[in-house]
Image: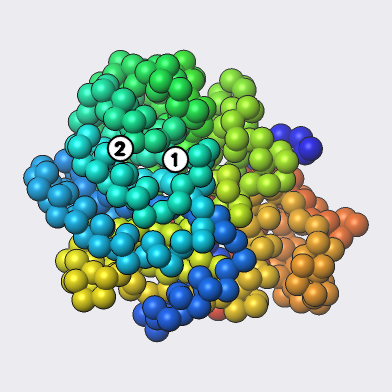
Amino acid sequence: MKQPTQISWDQSMIEKYNYSGPRYTSYPTALEFDDAFTEQDLLTSIKNSKTDKLSLYVHIPFCAKLCYYCGCNKIITRHAHKADQYIEYLAAEIIKRAPLFKHYTVTQMHWGGGTPTFLSPEQILKLTALIKAHFNFAEVGEYSIEVDPREIELSMLDTLKEAGFNRVSIGVQDFNKDVQVAVNREQDEQFIFDLIAKAKALGFVSTNVDLIYGLPLQTPETFAQTIARIIELSPDRLSVFNYAHLPSRFAAQRKIKDVDMPSPQQKLDMLHQTIESLTGAGYQFIGMDHFAKPNDELAKLQNAGKLHRNFQGYTTQEECDLLGLGVSSISQIGDCYAQNQKDIRPYYEAIDANGHALWKGCSLTRDDEIRRAVIKQIICHFDLDMAKIEAAFDIQFESYFAEDLTLLKTFIDDKLVDISNRKLSVSATGRLLIRNICMCFDVYYRQKARQQQFSRVI
């Protein structure tokens, strides 16, 4: 059993390496997907996959209100009938896809968005019943859903429990009222406390809260107050995301005034304070923007060397293939990635024409698989045993990764990475810069000057 991850703040190193880069929810990243990837490629990957465990991701794109900071794939509407139409198309996709996975057992399911709780209780129960009728679900599994606390009643948790969900993730972002107004996301603080209390009383096994630092009108002082309240709220997991202000890419962000934005130094101060406060309160730093209580499954699996990472972020089910359902959803099956149509009208048209909505993807080369294994190990566990990679892939590590190890030298010189006895370990200071370290092993990143397409690492 490994010791829990420790981190150490070094302002000079963070400033030196705080440039843009991928989040590595996949390798290769989604930038490498193309429409030459076919349905037959996907079918071949399903046939050749070596697992019989499945994770389902269901995308619900609807939101009742526009949050100005949001870069997610969503549709702003208050018309419930649009969700009825969407569920009909999801049903068609499920009926088409499910027979391909009849030998799989579903041990994990996550609903994201958009806002999954945009759906009514009746729609949620209808959709979960449909999914369970077509896939084989394990009696015990991890079934989670994202919850928007603004537009629901407390009784929604009873519906989610009835539907089989046992984990909830609540979008809070910030408790400060001025910040909420600035991003068009006003919510009731006491209701969020009541939601978490009821979820625990109903037996939900894990609660997660999402926060964002770097939003307009935030200061280190006001965000520290939010963190103090979150510690009182005591969720099992926390995600504290860095807000990437990219108004040229996301039209809604143009409603945010540049003059209201915190400075880069203020953002670093917010992150520094947050890490100190959460780890001081007993939370374990999982990696990048994630924290968990020591008895949470994420922390336990990281300490056991078994943490996994995919398009859902850090996750617990390493042995699963991932099937994405719904508009823009991404699947990770065996040696391929596959993404559905990104926009709703093409998604509907594709379902009408084909029964599925495959848009693009990629099949992994042997080099991709080797590099994926290396990057996943480093980003999940902050270490790497070269001999294990050699045994798994029949390579000689130092010669295969000669160029990568040269790129890594600057991190070694700065004592962010250590290599001894053919084992790579990331220092307590380097762990905040884990994305940059992983970039050394990303051959696509080297080949293309794409930094502008990624958010800064901090």
Task: Establish if 153 lies above or below 77.
Answer: above
Mark closer to the observer (1, 2): 1
Q: Which of 296 and 214 is in front in this view?
A: 296
Residue 411 lies in what quarter of the image? bottom right
Return the disc, 1 or 2, that comes first in the chain's sequence. Answer: 1
Quadrant the N terminus occupies: top right
Element at label 1? strand
- Vertical position of residue 396 compared to residue 326: above or below: below
Provide residue 202's location: percent of width, then percent of height. Answer: 41, 20
Say what amino acid the circle numbered 2 marks.
Answer: Pro
How many numbered badges does the structure rendering display? 2
The reply to whether dot 1 and dot 2 touch (C-beta < 8 Å) is no
Colour scheme shown: rainbow
Location of residue 28 in the rendering, given as x and y in whole percent from the top left corner: 53, 69
Residue type at mark 1 is Tyr
Q: Identify the mark at residue 16; answer none if there is no mark.
A: none
The residue located at (37%, 18%) in the rendering is 198
Q: Callout 2 environment at 10 Å: few (<14), some (14 to 19), or many (20+)?
A: many
Residue that appears at 51% across and 70% down: 46
Can the viewer see residue 438 in this picture?
Answer: no
Residue drawn at x 62%, y 66% as measured from the top left: 50
Q: Is residue 139 visible?
A: yes
Inter-mark Cα distance, 1 to 2: 34 Å
Category of crowding for the residue at label 1, using alpha-carbon neighbours closer than 10 angstroms: few (below 14), some (14–19), many (at least 20): many
| Helix, strand or loop under label 2 | loop
Disc 2: which residue: 216
**At x 21% / y 60%, what residue is drawn?**
89
Residue carrying label 1: 143
- Where is residue 380 drawn, in percent x and y? 64, 49
